[in-house]
Image (spheres, coloured by chain):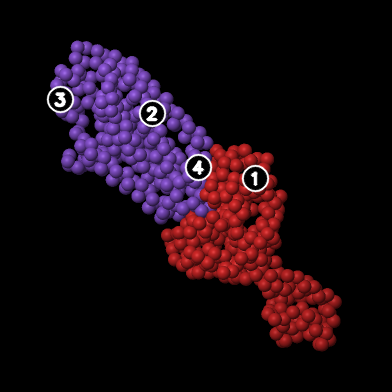
Amino acid sequence: MKKLLQIESIITLNNASFRTILTLHFLLFLLVIYVFTQIDITAPGFSTKNMFMFPHVWEIYAWIASWFNLLFLGLIIIVLTGNEFNYKTVRMQIINGLSRNEFLSGKLLIIFFMAIWAALIVFLSSIITGLIFTKDISIQLILDKSYMILIYFFQAIAYMSFALMVAVLFRSNALSIIMYLLYFIMIEPLTRLFFPKVVRPYFPVKVMSDLTPVPEFLSITSNSTETGGNNILDFDSIGLFQKALPLHLSLIMGVFYTILFIAISYWIIKKRDF
Amino acid sequence: MNEVIQISNLSKRYKKIIAIQNLSFSVKKGQVYGILGPNGSGKTTTLSILTGIIHKDSGSFQWFGKDPTPDSLKRIGTLIETPNFYPYLTLYQNLKIIAQIKSCSYSDISRVLGITNLLTRKHSKFMTLSMGMKQRLGIAATLLGDPEVLVLDEPTNGLDPEGIAEIREIIINQAENGKTILIASHILGEVEKVCSHVAILKEGKVISEGSVHALLSGDEIIHIITKKQDEFMEALVREGLVKTIEKVDDEIVLSLTKGSSSGDLNEFAFKNGFVLEKIEVSKQSLESQFLELIK
């Protein structure tokens, strides 16, 4: 474990692409939430500022950050893993005595620590924003929905595990990035259309993205006392988005897919000639 | 257990192409064992299987008398084809990764960089190195942790004569220090100078194997000048002393049958009244042996 951590830290921390993408991830996320917090549309019974109050800020920021998981963290994993094949350093590691299992474990360690990094950013920015915008703060209010950070952390791992599988499968950075994005944008959404509605929420991308579902903006921005706390104005109810699986089921399916992605990656690495 | 590597009926095919077929040989401790063969004969495939980067189809092999594991590879220094390192890392950082894998001290990095004359470039990025330097770094990496065995695939690939001489010297020094070395090459002069034993591969099969000395001493080439050329040639053939015999200009060039020596030839000439004005013995080079074998 310590050995793998040291190896991966040498490989990643000295990699300019890794540092650049991670910095971009951090700065763009801050920029986006800064821009969001500057939006101030207030009307009787409606305020965009509600989005940045506890407890809504947790789900809003987790949802915004989930796009960064998909784009930046997934791409980092593809680049780091793809480099091992492009530079043939996977051979170098194996011939010197690193097992194929350890090679994969090293990449999983990167995934784990990057997910912690991403969750930490969302956690800190949510705390700071929540403290600034919430008027009547209580521990109860802060903790409510804070579990979204854990779910966000898990979602980051799921996205990056998928990226790892794609990188191991295609080996070329360019092809992997294209296939990774195509799968999210086109392949799965189109494939889902050929299946009955009841099956569609069980597809991997759908499951992963539903872990941090689109927040119920209308009910959040509306004064909750006026809507009676019922989600009568949420996007599901007005038919904008297909209803997601219940959170616990999304989590179970997410765990299943993450294990599947890692197992497929392991199988490919185990079987492949380098 | 004196055998460092034991290979038994190893086979590998790439779709329809047979890379190696029922390959068997063993390398004993302290041997410098050369695998010779033309391009595509299966040298790299063999070494790649032995070092775990490709899977065998059938057969078996053992390292140090045991089935191979990643741990057995930590006792071996390997360079397969071109050296593979992270281009954006320095020499020191690249070797730190290998030191971590092999669980050896970082202090050994300076030692191996010193052996390969790369100490002054310790903090240069790998991508800034010349071809020769990259190859030397590959050799440095194999020496990290002072392994018992070196596996080198075309270690002088792409090097200039000076670079070749440097690498050869390093290999000879390591052999003198008692390391077992398995080296694949198609540069025969190289193998002849470095190796104690050799296996010659053709189309994935071992077609000859043994000590370099035995392989080279098997066919002594003898050049003779005598006044009675034709009579002497007939007498030699009648006596069954020669394996090959021909006239080249004013000389008779021959090779003796197994068990015969140039002394026997001289004695035969004396007893039969042939005066030999010249008798010169030269050993057949590995190159000519090799070319004859792979015909």
Do the residues bearing badges 1 and 2 touch, measured as CB atoms within 8 Å? no
How packed is label 1: few (under 14 Cα within 10 Å), some, or many (20 or more)?
A: some
Identified at 46% across, 53% down, the residue is A99
Label 3 in the same subunit as label 1 = no
Instruction: Kindly state the secondary structure of the residue where label 4 is placed.
Output: helix
Query: Looking at the rendered structure, which numbered label has been put on residue A230?
Result: 3
Q: Which residue is mark 2?
A: A121
Please identify which colour was used for chain A in the image: purple
Residue A86: in sight, yes or no?
Answer: no
How packed is label 2: few (under 14 Cα within 10 Å), some, or many (20 or more)?
A: some
Please identify which colour was used for chain B in the image: red
Identified at 47% across, 30% down, the residue is A20
Where residue B209 appears, as percent x and y from the top left, is 60, 70
- The amino acid beneath tag 2 is Ile
**Chain of the residue displaying label 1:** B
**Chain of the residue displaying label 4:** A
**Chain of the residue displaying label 3:** A
Q: Which residue is mark 1?
A: B110
Q: Which residue is mark 4?
A: A6
Where residue A57 appears, as percent x and y from the top left, is 29, 24
Q: Is residue B236 above or below residue A127?
A: below
- The amino acid beneath tag 3 is Asn
Q: Judge by depth and name the residue closer to the eye, A206 or A9.
A: A9
- Where residue A38 sits, quadrant-wise, is top left
Instruction: Kindly state the secondary structure of the residue where label 2 is placed.
Output: helix
Do the residues bearing badges 4 and 1 touch, measured as CB atoms within 8 Å? no
Q: Could you tell me how far apart the alpha carbons at marks 3 and 4 are, in whole angstroms? A: 51 Å
How packed is label 4: few (under 14 Cα within 10 Å), some, or many (20 or more)?
A: some
Q: Could you tell me how far apart the alpha carbons at marks 4 and 1 are, in whole angstroms? A: 19 Å
- Where residue A201 sits, quadrant-wise, is top left
* In the displayed structure image, the side of residue A188 where residue B119 appears, left or right: right
Quadrant for the C terminus of chain B in the image: bottom right
